[in-house]
Image: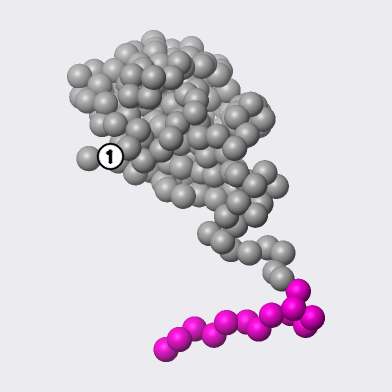
Amino acid sequence: MTAAVDAPAAGGAKDTNPLLGWRGDVHGRPTTLVLLRHGVTANTQRKLFCGRGGSDPGLVAEGEAQAARAAAWIARHHDVDAIVASPLRRTRETAGFVARETGLEVAVDDGVEEAAFGDWDGHGFGDIMERWPEEMSAWLASTSVAPPGGESFDQVQERVREARDRILADHAGETVVVVSHVTPIKLMTRLALDGPMSIIHRMELAPASITTIAWWPDGTPSLRGFSIVPE
């Protein structure tokens, strides 16, 4: 069965809000953010909380191989204009592989740094549930609650929003690889989808995976891929 198509409005007026895929250059050139999560570290492999202000581990051999594959995939699929990375060691090392593939320098932006997990940094989920059960329950129940000595997701959202605005202003119409972490990438995706904060608990982001979002000059976002893992 062929789907019905709505007739044009009276007088031949055009739809002022076409499907995103039809936007083309009529609305200007979008700024494309290629969001790359870092490769694995020893803490990633052990499933430990690891944020800003913590031990700041570097990539292990597996993480370097993941970063190399991701960088090669990005170079094949995008004409990259700039690279922005979180200041943490694992993201700067991952960004280095993209820099070698593209010949570009890496800029650092604190706004895309991982959340601060405070007293929980370096601990696993089970350990935290045993030692801080009430605090963990409150944290899981509300994005406004911070771990002891850490940041709430609401706080991280504000700095991610500011970082996004900076990148869009500085690189209008360009393609920017942003090398970051689970929390900022989920929050950037939430901004694009305009979903509730709770949606971040329903996303799963693989190490060295790629999420792509285009932002058009009128502010309209388009999610073009989520957590793609290059082979």
- Whether residue 142 is visible, yes or no, is no
Rendered position, 187 above or below 51 = below
Q: Is residue 214 left or right of residue 165?
A: left
The quadrant of the picture occupied by the C terminus is top left
Q: Is residue 73 left or right of 133 when viewed as pictured?
A: left
The residue under the point 22% across, 25% down is 65
**Residue ID at (39%, 13%):** 89
Residue extending farthest to the right is: 11
Residue 222 forms part of the magenta stretch: no
Q: How is the image coloured?
A: one colour
Label 1: which residue? 230
Residue nearest the observer in this picture, 8 or 86: 8
**Which picture quadrant has residue 228?**
top left
Q: How far from the left and from the top, in percent, is residue 37?
A: 39, 31
Tell which residue pokes out farthest to the bottom in this image: 1
Which range is magenta?
1-13
Q: Secondary structure at mark 1?
A: loop
